[in-house]
Amino acid sequence: MCRPAPVPSVVVMETASTPAPAPTSRRRLGLPVPAVIGLALLAAPRVVLHDLGLVTEGSAVNAALVFVPPAVWVAVVLLTRAAHPFRTLLAVGAAYGVLLAAIHQVLWHVQFPDGSPLPGGNLAGTSPVLGELLVRGAAVLSSLVTGVVVGAVAGAVAWLIRRAAGHRLS
C-alpha cells in the first residue's frame, strides 16, 4: 500500500506564502487616521466661534482655543510614544488646515455679508466672479499653510521635548 505524501503544517504554509505586511497608516503617521482627524477636530471650535464672531481675538477664551489643541496634540504623541512625532503632528496640522479651509468657506457669508472682498492692485477691475474665486482660493491656500505650520511647530515642540527627555518618553 502506498502512503500519501506528508502535508505541510499550517504554520509552514502561512510562513512560506504570507507576504510581509504593508506599512499601515499608523506606522507612517504614528497614529491611526481617525486619531489624526480627531486631534485636528479639537482645533475646529475656535475657527467656527471666530468666524461667527462669538470669540474675540485677545481674549482668554480665544487664547485657550488657540493654544490648548496643539498642546493636546503634543501630549498625545508623547504619551502614545508615536515613532515620529514631527511627522505625526505635521499630518494633524495638514488635517487641521483642511478643516480650517472648509469651515472658512462654509461660513464665508457670515464674515462677508455684503459680498466677498475683491482683489485690488493689478487685479482690480477683474470680474466679480473671478475676483471672488481668487480671494476664496487665497483663503484656502492660507488656511492650508496655516494648518501645516501649526502642525510643524507642534511637531517640533514634541520632538524637542522627547529629545530633551533623552527618549525616556519613547
Image (cartoon, grey):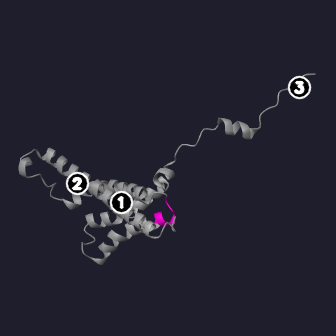
SS assignment at label 3: loop
Part of the protein shown in magenta: 76-82
Q: Residue at x 32, y 75 (%)?
A: 61
Between 121 and 51, the one nearer to me in the picture: 121
Instruction: List the residue tagged with mark 3.
Output: 3
Q: Return the disc, 1 or 3, that comes first in the chain's sequence.
A: 3
How packed mark 1 is, by other alpha carbons closer than 10 Å (few <14, some 14-19, many 20 or more), is many
Instruction: List the residue tagged with mark 2.
Output: 139
Of badges 2 and 3, the one in the foreground is 3
Amino acid type of the residue tagged 1 in the rendering:
Gly
| Displayed quadrant of residue 54 | bottom left
Instruction: List the residue tagged with mark 1.
Output: 151
Relative image position of residue 19 (x, y in whole percent): 60, 38
- Say which quadrant the N terminus sits in: top right
Residue 70: numbered disc: none
Label 1, label 3: how many angstroms apart (C-alpha)? 66 Å
SS assignment at label 1: helix
Q: Return the disc, 2 or 3, that comes first in the chain's sequence.
A: 3
Q: Return the disc, 1 or 2, that comes first in the chain's sequence.
A: 2
| Displayed quadrant of residue 21 | top right
